[in-house]
Image (spheres, rainbow, N blue to C red):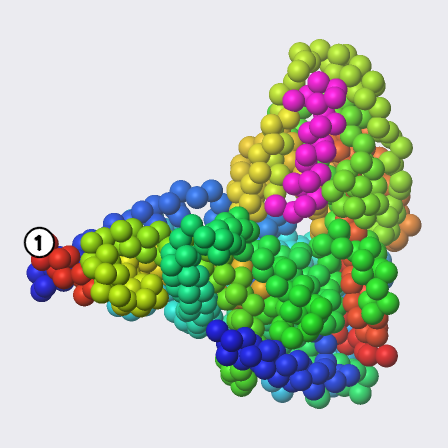
Amino acid sequence: MRHAFYLAFFLGTSALVSGAQAATKDSVTIGMALEPPGLDPTMGAAAAIGEVTHYNIFEGLTKIGEDFSVSPLLARSWSFSKDLKTLTFQLQQGVKFQDGQPFTSADVKYSFERDAAKASTNKDKAFFASIQSIDASNPQVVVLKFKAPSFQALYHLGMNTAVIIDAKSAATEATHPVGTGPYTFGTWTKGASLTLNKWDGYRDAAHIAIRHATFRFMSDPAAESAALLAGDIDAFPRFQGVEDVSAFQKDPRFKVTVGGTEGKTIIAINNKQKPLDNLKVRQAIAYAIDRKAIIDGAMNGFGTPIGSHLTPNDPGYIDLTGQYPYDPAKSKALLKAAGVKLPLSLTLTLPPPAYARQGGQIIAAELAKVGINVKIINVEWAQWLSGVFKNKNYDLTVISHVEPLDIGIYANPDYYFQYDNKDYQNIITKMNAAPDLASFKKYIGEAQHKLADDCVNVYLFQLAQITVANAKLQGLWKNGPIFVNDLSAMSWK
Amino acid sequence: MTTYLLQRLMILIATLVLASVVIFAVLDILPGNAAQTMLGASATPQTVAALAHKLGLDQPAPLRYGEWISGLVRGNLGRSYAYHSSIAALISASLKISGPLALLAMVIAATVALVAGMAAAARHGKASDGAIMMASQIGLAVPNFWFGIMLVLVFAVNWRLLPSGGFPGWTPDPLRAFSALILPALALGLVQAAILTRVTRSALLDVLHEDYIRTARAKGLTPQAIIRRHALPNAMIPILTIMGLQLANLVAGAVVVENVFSLPGLGRLIFQSISNRDTPVVADCVLLLVAIVIGVNFLVDLACAMIDPRLRMQP
């Protein structure tokens, strides 16, 4: 046994030495909570796919920045027609795919038509289906004609669902992705880690500081903290261990940033379920909820209260958190006015994340105070997706909607909230046809008010993006409007 | 002995067939499917239907079962929905970690348990026996994930001797890969050792009351020699049986420890595949585990039969 221990110490030391040699200033190891299932963001929906591939391996026509701005990427510039139905892109010249194939307008046409095809499993297929025709007659110019005015097209085109792929490698993107980005796919040890290497053929290779990147997958918050403390990973964007954040903040070896994501954490309500179809009952639930208690209790204080289905980082955001302040007395009065027999029994379905499981306990306690007895049902994701989302078999659920600017989901009466309102649907139609940012903001403002007035759901808070990183690593995003780890922006001090 | 072997083999195959039906049926009635889970909440029902069709989820269950079994018979384990790769490759990669991890943990558990169990039995009722029993009681009470986190804090965070988790792969640096397995093997092995110590001690104590031990003592053998030469071989049957169960448990049941150490072993593969509703992977892995458990038990029975000739005689 003594020999075994000596062996352990010897091996440990050797590992340390080789680790120190590898940690030169041009490599980075990034922690991620979930492993991507496949690596083709145009055919798979998991956020982790974008976190590895978007901007690194694959690029789209436009780039969404940390502040939600849209800037050129594979497109140099663009212009809308007056009716907002035609969008013309001038493409970057001399761009190649990592396999040497030239990038032209034909690739854009191929990619978008593939995304819209019948067999396509693109998450944003509805957007690609809204493109009437794609003109690629000039290799440097793409003309997209939409069926309806499409002001938001630039955002859609900046998502990882709209990256441009090459017809030659399309079939194998999920396992061996080939894009136009600054990094090529290296190796993938399933369940453990994935590596990317700098591509020297990239059009802007001189400005890329990080040569090797490793993504390590660890789903256990305690393991995340331990790996950071042990120096095994350099950065953990979207860090989950909220309880450990203050310890990292005090440690000079680390830099902690707290920004916002697009996650709108809500208590979703089944608007067709009795008595939740009654506005007064929904409002009673809203008045019974103390957002701050939930943010403090479930998220250690990380999260910004919201009052409708938009985050403070979004264009056109209006603060409506004052519409339903915490007021149990008013809640009880509303329940009485609605003629509900107390105690009212409802179910609360909770998916795995901490905001739901821990937040759900607090919500149940708060609702009990006004006479609503909540039965908590803990489910895993697949159960949530089939039971709540697909079959609408629920009363209340806690969930964070992480898609950017997805306020349009309320215009679909079949969506799991089952909110069917003509006025709202008209607002969204007008918003989608908005000719400019100012009128877009006007309509998205109306939409927020309408959702709050009708109290479709109870809007809790914006999910925080917590990043814990080695203090010497720079270029990490503070806010997370989309799920990316932009390696090209990173460097060591 | 041949009839005995043949009998056992027939039972083994029948169990596997029965297990395959149960596994398939349970996975089939599980709420949620791979297409919906992979596409999440933002895809339209049409997109989900398109993926379900592509994956063949819209086929009737008996047909899918038939395809699975006929594939297995031909040595084709199928493809993973989530990873888009062959399941055989996924399982063999995970076994390259789970196998050595389980063996290493078993070696640790067996070494500690035999030494401690023999020491406790030899000094039955004395202070050192009490101390060993107390230590094993603590070992039983401590959950292995917590013990794993403690090991990481001491060896990886404070002393920086061993990696905190992850697995670098057996190539190009097998020593580094081995060092990644030491802490998880300790976390698993020492907890198992606690159970095995108690089994070893009580099995030895049972034997120590036998007549032949009294005879050995009367011959003038030292207590150590009595335990080593006469008591231990006779106490081995319950110890081996428990070790067999533990080994199977270590291959599959390491999922929590694998999560703490971010090791891509078989337990984690099954766990993730269940979350993803990657049912072909789950079905193959669980059937493999059934086969391992049955196989290990079969080997344990054989070993017991070798130790104790009386077991061989039974029809």
Nearest the camera: A430 or A265?
Answer: A265
Is B151 a magenta residue?
no
Residue plotted at (78% across, 67% down): A469
Residue plotted at (62% across, 39% down): A350
Residue A420 visible to the viewer: no
x%, y% of residue B160?
Answer: 68, 73
Q: Classify residue A410 by image quadrant.
A: top right
Q: Classify residue B78 by image quadrant.
A: bottom left
Q: Is residue A69 above or below residue B19?
A: below
Which amino acid, by three-letter code, is at mark 1? Pro
How many callouts does the rendering have? 1
Residue A6 visible to the viewer: yes
Q: Which residue is mark 1?
A: B315
Q: Classify residue A452 by image quadrant.
A: top right
Is A354 a magenta residue?
yes
> Dot 1, crowdedness within 10 Å: few (<14), some or many (≥20)?
few
x%, y% of residue B132?
Answer: 48, 55
Nearest the camera: B211 or B172?
Answer: B211
Q: Is residue A159 above or below residue A297?
A: below
Residue plotted at (75% across, 12% down): A336
Please state if B306 lies on the left or on the right of A385 as rendered.
Answer: left
Chain letter of disc 1 in the image: B
Residue plotted at (63% across, 87% down): A100
Please state if B25 lies on the left or on the right of A64 as rendered.
Answer: left
What secondary structure is marked by label 1?
Answer: loop
Q: Which residues are magenta?
A: A352-373
Please state if A64 lies on the left or on the right of A176 as rendered.
Answer: right
Helix, strand or loop for the magenta stretch, by majority: helix
